[in-house]
């Protein structure tokens, strides 16, 4: 899992340069956005108390508020967390599938950059 030291939290950018996480975050109402921002801050401090693996290196951070929000991320090395997207319990399976595709895309593009 993640270290208990501070980590750098970044957003995954799709090939077109947009952030699926930012698009989701921007759609939230102010109270939900505040809860999610708080969860990102906790994540950046290494707090993973509401985190579970959903497979293939992707993790789900559960935010117990309103529609039971979820944030999806993966770890790139020991000190970087990549936000892949977010959603609610209602769309959980679709959101997990999207996060897995984004993580694979990120790793593929990173590998191509280093070749």
Image (cartoon, rainbow, N blue to C red):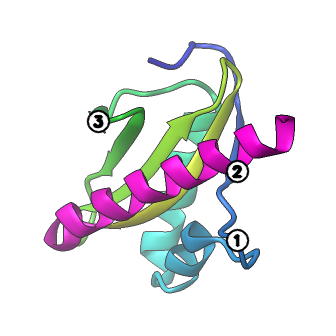
Magenta-drawn stretch contains 97: yes
Marks 1/2: CA–CA distance: 9 Å
> How many numbered marks, from 0 up?
3
- Which residue, as the protein is rendered here, is positioned at the far left? 90
Q: How crowded is mark 2: few (under 14 residues within 10 Å), some or many (20 or more)?
A: few
Q: Identify which residue, 77 or 65, lies in the foreground.
A: 77
**Residue at point 65%, 71% (across, down):** 19
Where is residue 88 drawn, in percent x and y? 26, 68
CB within 8 Å, label 1 to label 2: yes
Q: In this view, does 35 lie to the left or right of 45?
A: left
- The residue pinned by badge 3 equals 55
**Sequence-earlier tag: 1 or 2:** 1
Residue 83 vs 24, above or below: the answer is above
Magenta-drawn stretch contains 109: yes
Marks 2/3: CA–CA distance: 20 Å
**Sequence-earlier tag: 2 or 3:** 3
Which residues are the magenta region?
88-115
- The residue pinned by badge 2 equals 109
- The residue pinned by badge 1 equals 15
- The reply to whether residue 38 is visible in this rendering is no
Q: Residues within 10 Å of mark 3 (few under 14, many from 20)?
A: few
The image quadrant that residue 67 belongs to is bottom left
**Residue at point 76%, 74% (across, down):** 17
């Amino acid at each position: 899992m993640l270290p208990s030291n501070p980590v750098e939290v970044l957003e995954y950018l799709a090939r077109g340069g947009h952030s699926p996480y930012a698009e989701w975050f921007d759609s939230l109402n102010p109270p939900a956005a505040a809860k999610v921002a708080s969860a990102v801050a906790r994540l950046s401090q290494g707090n993973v108390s509401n985190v579970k693996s959903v497979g293939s290196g992707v993790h789900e951070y559960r935010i117990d508020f309103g529609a039971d929000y979820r944030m999806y991320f993966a770890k790139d090395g020991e000190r970087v967390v990549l936000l892949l997207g977010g959603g609610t319990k209602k769309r959980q399976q679709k959101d997990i599938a999207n996060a897995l595709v984004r993580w694979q895309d990120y790793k593929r593009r990173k590998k191509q950059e280093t070749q």
